[in-house]
Image (cartoon, rainbow, N blue to C red):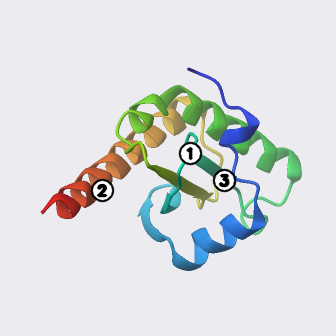
Amino acid sequence: MNTFKKGEKLCSEKKIQILFNTGESFYCYPFKVHYLWINVADPDLPQVLITVPKRNHKKAVNRNRIKRIIREAYRLNKQQLIDTIAPDQQLLLGLVFTAREQIEFKELNERISILLRKLISIIEKNQQKLME
């Protein structure tokens, strides 16, 4: 299950607008995380949008390298997130890289793991509220 296919990438402009306009967010250095639950009849895997602002990293080479590292770290750690998602919901996830310096893979991998654990705890709290 360690793949990152086209269906897992958030590409739809409508969904992106909905995610940033109505979704919730939190900050977990070096990411600002936006997330939104969508009730769908046939849910797919969580869809992820990864962005690196041009304001912080001027060269496209650097932005693309950071995005590639983030994708790889997410791909390796996403199973813990997939296991906690309810079967009738789909998660839209936006990861905005906010650090001004470049971060190596090992540290980013740890940060993604921490970020996903924090998101899982938020998911579990919301599921408990819905059951009450």
How far apart are the two marked residues, 2 and 1, measured between alpha carbons? Answer: 23 Å
The label nearer to you, 3 versus 1, is: 1
Disc marking residue 102: none
**Total number of numbered labels?**
3
Which quadrant of the view contains residue 4? top right
Quadrant where the image shows the N terminus: top right
Judging by the rendered image, the residue that carries numbered circle 2 is 122
Q: x and y percent of residue 40 in the render?
A: 53, 55
Q: Give the structural element (helix, strand or loop) at label 3.
A: strand
- Which of the two discs, 2 and 1, labels the residue nearer the N terminus? 1
Q: x and y percent of residue 9 in the render?
A: 70, 45
Q: Is 118 situated left or right of 13 in this image?
A: left
CB atoms of marks 2 and 1 within 8 Å: no
- How busy is the neighbourhood of tag 2: few (under 14 within 10 Å), some, or many (20 plus)? few
Judging by the rendered image, the residue that carries numbered circle 3 is 49
- Which of the two discs, 3 and 1, labels the residue nearer the N terminus? 1
Q: Residue at x 58, y 30 (%)?
A: 75
Residue type at mark 1: give it.
Answer: Asp
Q: x and y percent of residue 126 in the render?
A: 26, 60
Judging by the rendered image, the residue that carries numbered circle 1 is 42
Furthest toward the top, the residue is 1
- Which of the two discs, 2 and 3, labels the residue nearer the N terminus? 3
Residue type at mark 2: give it.
Answer: Ile
Q: Is 60 situated left or right of 49 in this image?
A: right
Residue type at mark 3: give it.
Answer: Leu
Q: Give the structural element (helix, strand or loop) at label 2.
A: helix
Q: Residue at x 22, y 62 (%)?
A: 130
